[in-house]
Image (tube, rainbow, N blue to C red):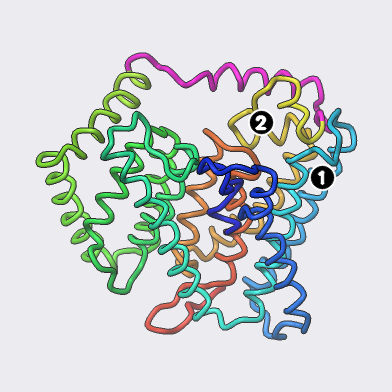
Amino acid sequence: MSLLGGRWSPARLGAEGDRILDLFSPRYVSILVLLFVAASFSRRPSSRRGPMDVDAAKYVAMTTVFLTWIAITSLWADVDPLENQKLLDVGLIALTVPVVWRIVSHVDRAILSAMVKRLLLVASSAIALAGLPGLIGGARRVAALGGGPNVFARIVGVALSLLISENGAVPLRPLLVAIFGGLIVASGSRGGMISVALGVCVIIAIRGVADARRTVKLAALSAAMVAFLVGMSPIGDRVAAVFRLRVLRLTIEEQYVSGRDEIAMKAIQYWESNLWLGGGLGEFKRVTGDYPHNIILEIGAEAGLVGVVLFLASQYFFVRRLMLNWRALDPAWVGLWVMYVIAAQFSGDLFDSRAIFVMPVVALLLIRQVNGKRMQVD
């Protein structure tokens, strides 16, 4: 719910009573569930601690420091803390990271990894398939359930990444890969296309030569499905039309970037005027009516250079371990982290990019399983 649900609520489907329905949104329900889970795991975790466990603990501590600083900056923002939705968003991320860490520290990790992958695959696939009516109906940019196309592309990217990384049998895998790839393109999200493509490349790279035959087979079958959909169905025509418009025409020919360059310059100028401490949480949007569409610029503008340094310091513990033991890490979690990091440079605010903070915990602790055994870590 925390990763996929975001700010969605039943009110987006056109139901009445927005304020009441918001209480049943994934954001609020997630807070209650996380508090319940945190209270349930009151006993101490196993004393067996490897290098990954130590780095995970350091990562959680540093991320908590970073998020605490982000929350503190709301004190000098000209926004009422009780009405500052970004403060609630940051609080949810700050609650999610240590609770996920505590869950993984208590539960059998092999079982948990398989279970989380299946749940994420089913949930993200369901949201992806909910976008099919828009694609069939000729929507200009495909999304689902009242959400935006950029977020939709990321959620479909989760489904696609898990399909490619999954070892077990998945019914109609090549067809689903082709459909999900088409939906990402049909969303029109150029940042989504780039981030998903790079995330999938990382997954394939970590899987290594041992899985090359399987990867080539899946790629060939998926390409055949894509060729069929493009050549023999109106769905393929619509996907191709979106690609021609959004990528070939707007991006390459006209160099249109949806005003991202202008908003980036505003964020840089605002950051320069509040260099060290930033303007405060939510202040940039209050002043400009928009957000930077880049996580580094958002942190810099609202939390200053101190916030950027703390953010990079928190990610260091994961990147360092990734460089040292990339073969031991599960390609699915690393690929998803890469996907969200790249996507956060094009669209989405801190809360939209929450997987950047959660995925390292999962990747560090749910080590890759090979022939039923955890890989060795240096």
Direction from residue 19 to residue 152 in the image, left or right: left
Label 1: how many Cα within 10 Å (few below 14, some 14–19, many 20+): many
Q: Which disc is residue 12 wearing?
A: none
Q: Residue 366, located in which quarter of the rendered image?
A: bottom right
The one of 350 and 261 positioned closer to us in this rendering: 350
Does dot 1 land on a helix, a strand or a loop?
A: helix
Q: Is residue 202 left or right of residue 177?
A: right
Q: Position of residue 339 (x, y in %)?
A: 47, 48
Q: Which residue is mark 2?
A: 297
Q: From the viewer's perspective, is residue 277 above or below residue 169? A: above
Residue 12 sits inside the magenta stretch: no
Q: Residue 71 — which label? A: 1
**Mark 2 residue element:** helix
- Reply yes or no: does residue 276 show up in magenta: yes
Count of marks overlaid on the render: 2
Q: Give the residue drawn at x 65%, y 42%.
A: 18
Horizontal side of 46 relative to 237 (left or right) equals right
Residue 342 visible within the image: no
Location of residue 246 with respect to 214 vertically, above or below: above
Q: Amino acid at mark 1?
A: Ala
Image location of residue 276, percent across then percent down: 83, 31
Q: Which residues are magenta?
A: 253-279
Q: Residue furthest left?
A: 232
The C terminus lies in quadrant: bottom right
Cα distance in 3D space between marks 1 and 2: 17 Å
Q: Looking at the picture, which amino acid does disc 2 mark?
A: Leu
Estimate the x, y position of residue 42 in percent, counting from the top left.
78, 80
Q: Residue at left 65%, top 74%?
A: 103
